[in-house]
Amino acid sequence: MENERAKAAQRTTRLHLGMEAMETLRQVEEFPDNPLAMGYFYKLFQKMFTGDSMLPENKQIIATMCVQVPDELIYATGAVPFRLCSGAYAYDQIGAEFMPAKSCPVVRATSGMLNINEEIWGDKLSSVVIPTTCDQKKKAAEQIGDWSYNVYSLEMPSSKESDAARFYWQESVKQFALDLQKITGRKITRKNVKKAIAKKSEAGQLYRKLHELRMSDSPVILGKDMLLVTNAFFMDDIDNWIPAVTKLLAELQERSSEKITVSGRNAPRVLLTGSPPVFPNIKVPILVEQSGAVIVADEVCSSSRLLYDAVAYDEEILNDMIPAIADRYLKPCTCPCLSPNNDRKRKLVEMVKDFKVDGVVYQAFSGCLPYEMEQMQIAKVLEEAGIPMLYVETDYSPEDQGQLSTRIEAFIESIKMRKRKRKGGIASAAGRL
Ligand code: SF4
Ligand code: SF4
């Protein structure tokens, strides 16, 4: 009887999940002139969220959370990484049954997903690797460990400023490499690590090319599509993701040379930062672009922070490559669980200049204290740089859509007015000359 009830709950959740994903995809595909190569990503999400299982078939899976788990070491064992951080309201509602009301939706949805799929996923996931990032992830790790999962807590320092912190992290990653060999039953060799670094770096190079393309005055891809491309990296087979992005890049480069743009030349250019937008919850980015703006850059852990940085090593020996991998995951990290986090402020100001950003949208999920608290410092830095910022607190429920839409539209309108005024000012100054 108990078993029957659990099965019925699973079926209902999968149904809700499918409907939620299809609704997001409907909104995404409703935009005109979507690049043809985006079809691969739309289909991928549809298949994953409406099919029988999201997990890769016939592979040894090492599940991860956050962005600090080194994919290269997982690939080096022949296993595949699968990032669990969930953006699904259907799973958030499952998590809400046993998690505190004030917990953040990422943690609630991820725990809900692991809980409801425990019976099947418990065997399929060789390990669930959770870095000790924010307090909620740390506490969720303890709870998930009580279920049928083999939880691995990857110890991360709370600062990256001192040599001691960097050394501590390097040791943590070395230990992880040793433990991964036990978990997977496969040896990590110099050759495999080199191959894995090269594979991830190929993905990173493609991402950086897309990133550079977004700096152009005439954007060729909308932010909602960029988020789907990067979110897909969480779950897709890297050997499928690379050719799909290569195809997309070629199409975008052609659009760029033919001066085809996804928005008017004067559309406000927005940078998105804050708590991570993860499919199907990309409502804020969609609302921003439905208001006539274009997200030309993002500083979130579900997109740019995931793929931008590369591993740089000097010698092809494990003793050099593994610390280099560790450095790649700590040195450029701008997660708000790090304190101080001045790098994030510096990076945001730099991105605002490089991408000619007119305004910043900062989303914080209700219950995400690290991002809620950091917004005051970020607002100050941006104000000093003369860049308007909209701060929105939201969650995974569709209920705040109307209220969010009103605030976002007003913000985008104010940026448009500002741009018009600036242009008018320049024109009248030119007239006076
Ligand atoms: S911002 Fe950092 S700590 Fe927070 S969910 Fe993303 S990777 Fe994890
Ligand atoms: S950083 Fe914020 S959004 Fe990410 S898991 Fe922690 S509380 Fe949640």
Image (tube, helix red, strand yellow):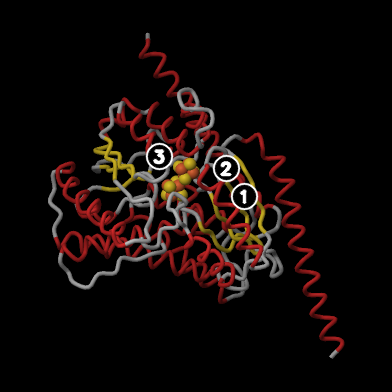
Asked if ligand 2 lies within 8 A of label 3, the reply is yes
Viewport quadrant of the N terminus: top left
- Residue 141, how many percent across, how many down? 34, 35
Viewport quadrant of the C terminus: bottom right
The residue that disc 3 covers is 137
- The answer to whether residue 318 is seen in the rendering is yes
Q: Residue furthest top?
A: 1
For the residue labelled by badge 3, is the local secondary structure a helix, a strand or a loop? helix
Mark 1 or mark 3: whose residue is earlier in sequence: 3
Q: Residue at coordinates 68% horizontally, 67% vertically from top-left?
A: 386
Q: Where 91 sits versus 134, above or below?
A: above
- Residue 110, how many percent across, how many down? 43, 36
Q: Residue at coordinates 73% horizontally, 55% vertically from top-left?
A: 411
Horizontal side of 339 relative to 184 (left or right) equals right
In this view, the residue in front, 147 or 341, is: 341
Q: Tell whether label 3 touches label 2 (CB within 8 Å).
A: no
C-alpha distance separating marks 1 and 2: 9 Å
Q: Nearer the viewer, mark 1 or mark 2?
A: 1
The residue that disc 1 covers is 286
At label 2, which amino acid type do we have?
Answer: Thr
C-alpha distance separating marks 1 and 3: 27 Å
Checking the image for residue 24, the label placed there is 2
For the residue labelled by badge 1, is the local secondary structure a helix, a strand or a loop? helix
Asked if ligand 2 lies within 8 A of label 2, the reply is no
At label 1, which amino acid type do we have?
Answer: Ile
